[in-house]
Amino acid sequence: MSDGPAIDVRGLTKIFSGRTVVDNVDLKIPEGQICGFLGPNGSGKTTTLRLICGLLIPDGGEGEVLGLDLLRDRHRIKEQIGYMTQKFGLFGDLTIRENLEFIARVYGLDRRGERVDAALERLGLETRSDQLAGKLSGGWKQRLALAACVLHEPRILLLDEPTAGVDPQARREFWDQIHQLAREGMTVLVSTHYMDEAERCHEIAYIAYGVMLVRGTADEVVAQSGLHALSGEGKGADRLAAEIEGLPGVEMAVPFGTTLHVCGTDPDKLRAAVEPWKERFRWREAEPTLEDVFIHMMRNAHDNSVIERP
């Protein structure tokens, strides 16, 4: 591992049909770190990943990836990156082993059989190596896709919502693999909508409609949001959401089981909003969640995909 960051881009910009999809984004990720990329659909996460790995050419900005110039060295950068797309992109009518052997040939790898065997073992695919990829469940397809991404031993791994549609156990096993890769020095940038996954990252970056809004550890992002929360407990507290949400100072009122989670930026107004129900329910201070921050930022971000008519 070198002393410099694995990814260091500045002012990254991409425009499609007059719309700025990625707007002056700065992103620096140290080697061996896992960075979670959060944001609403259409916020520019996938485009940013494609700009970093050289699949798209930026309309503005500069930077280095693994010490290589983002603009001049795109082909050399591609050789050292593994990119896992949202949609399963391998061959359904080939077996797991045949898919990996094909990928090894595409990259022109030496010791192909040895590398494929190692990948099968690492991802727990040995016993299924002769199964057709198209017959696999979502979790097993995910393992195969990850095996294909790291077969050429990249130094950076880009993952675009890799666990969408898979069960909790498969997601946990996937993340165990990601952390193992990071321990071995691989840098990971992963876009996700799952807040529990974001919390497993070393740091997170929130982008909304092309603009980077906040960056830091999960705790730092929550602290920077300026949000405060109360939790209401008592029989029927969860049924108050519709009455309380929208009151002055209340940005969100969300049932969690039998409790009610109330959130806003002004703690005094928040307490005043629940005052009429203080005799019926017990209210206590609570920690805002990463989901609270996500929704708060999404509601306050300007959606540049909406055409404003005069």
Image (spheres, rainbow, N blue to C red):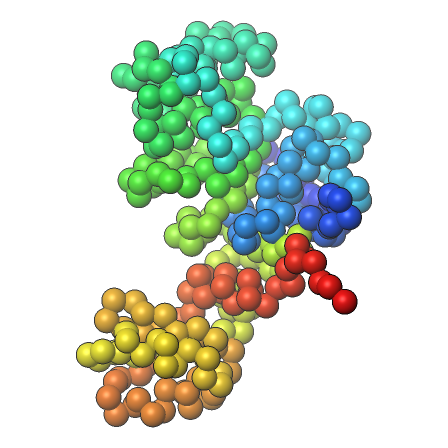
Inspect this view and state whether residue 282 appears. Answer: yes
Q: Nearer the viewer, residue 89 or 169?
A: 89
Q: Residue at x 42, y 78 (%)?
A: 245
Q: Quadrant of residue 209?
A: bottom right
Instruction: Answer whether residue 5 is visible to the viewer in this image.
Output: no
Q: Which residue lies furthest to the front in this view?
A: 310
Quarter of the figure with the C terminus: bottom right
Task: Name the spot of residue 103 as percent of width and height, x first.
Answer: 52, 15
Q: In this view, does 13 lie to the left or right of 150?
A: right
User: In the figure, residue 8 lies in which quadrant?
Assistant: top right
How far across and down, in percent of the image, does residue 285 sit? 36, 79
Q: In this view, does 280 lie above or below 6?
A: below
- The percent coordinates of residue 224 (x first, y second) are 55, 68
289 shown above or below 116? below
The residue drawn where x is 37% and y is 87% is: 274
Quarter of the image where the N terminus is located: top right
Pick the front one: 23 or 135:
135
- Within the image, what quadrant is residue 118 found in? top left
Q: In this view, does 300 lie to the left or right of 93?
A: right
Image point (38%, 40%), residue name? 165
Q: In this orientation, which residue lies closer to the viewer: 213 or 2?
A: 213
